[in-house]
Amino acid sequence: TKITEKQKLSIEESIKKTLNLFTPRSFTFYNNTKQIILSNRLPEEVVQGEELIGIDKILMNEATYYISKVYTVDDLNKTKVFDVYIPVRNLDMITGVFVFQIPEVFISYHVNMLVKQIVLTMIGGLSILFLLLTRQLHSASKTLIEQNNELIKQKAEIENAFKMLTDSYRNTIIALSNAVDARDSYTAGHSERVAKISLLIGNQLGIKEEDLKILGYAALFHDIGKIGIPD
């Protein structure tokens, strides 16, 4: 079958594309009548039987490409190969089929390379994710530490303010008690002495700390009514 110049250019373009993708051991070009037009295989290597299955699938538009099973070439190295069938189109019509014989080791090499790239990509992605999470955790931890320090500071300020308020309250009670005792020099210091004795008795009775405070205040105030009694 005569090949036109346009078909020849199309075939050459297909060969170039395929050679860029694969490293074929050999190639064979069939026209649309399944005749061998071009081949660099040895005559004894050109298979006429099983090859036609892939060619039929391509010519009948049952597949956009076809890959054969792995088989062993009868050479010195007993090379394992497989065939890749690629259609040749001209004006949207399939004018032939290229059959490229690809060594299995080529695919194994590229699969291994692909696996390595996937593994490296995953490791890189996980490393970046780990760094981002570490940075986020560090930032969150720093914020929590700052907030905790601020709470500790506020707690200390509240406790100090409460102590000052308690001291002020106690000083007010003592001042009122002293005002009662000041009216009579004979009873000066009486309320304070009663408070001390009450606390000693309360301790002996095992009264709680909070109740002892109330007892001490009550003892200081026990004569508060004297303020309203005329001299």
Image (tube, helix red, strand yellow):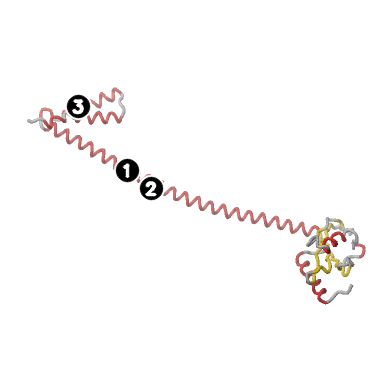
Q: Under tag 2, what secondary structure?
A: helix
Q: Is residue 50 left or right of residue 91?
A: right
Q: Under tag 3, what secondary structure?
A: helix
Q: CA distance from mark 2 to mark 3?
A: 44 Å
User: Mark 1 highlights which residue?
Assistant: 158
Pointer 2 and pointer 3: residues touching (CB < 8 Å)? no
- Quadrant where the N terminus sits is bottom right
Q: Is residue 230 left or right of residue 29?
A: left
- Name the outermost residue toward the top: 205
Foreground residue, 71 or 78?
71
Residue 186: quadrant of the picture? top left
Pointer 3 and pointer 1: residues touching (CB < 8 Å)? no
Mark 1 residue type: Ile
Q: Position of residue 125 (x, y in %)?
A: 61, 55
Q: Is residue 116 left or right of residue 218?
A: right
Q: Nearer the viewer, mark 3 or mark 1?
A: 1
Mark 2 residue type: Glu
Q: Under tag 1, what secondary structure?
A: helix
User: Mark 3 highlights which residue?
Assistant: 194
Q: Position of residue 18 (x, y in %)?
A: 78, 66
User: Mark 2 highlights which residue?
Assistant: 150
Alpha-carbon neighbours of circle 1 within 10 Å: few (<14), some, or many (≥20)? Answer: few
* First-in-chain label (3 vs 1): 1
Pointer 2 and pointer 1: residues touching (CB < 8 Å)? no
Alpha-carbon neighbours of circle 2 within 10 Å: few (<14), some, or many (≥20)? Answer: few
Res 208 label: none
Q: CA distance from mark 2 to mark 1?
A: 12 Å
* First-in-chain label (2 vs 3): 2
Residue 219: quadrant of the picture? top left
Q: Residue at x 58, y 55 (%)?
A: 128
Q: Position of residue 207 (x, y in %)?
A: 30, 25
Q: Position of residue 44 (x, y in %)?
A: 92, 62
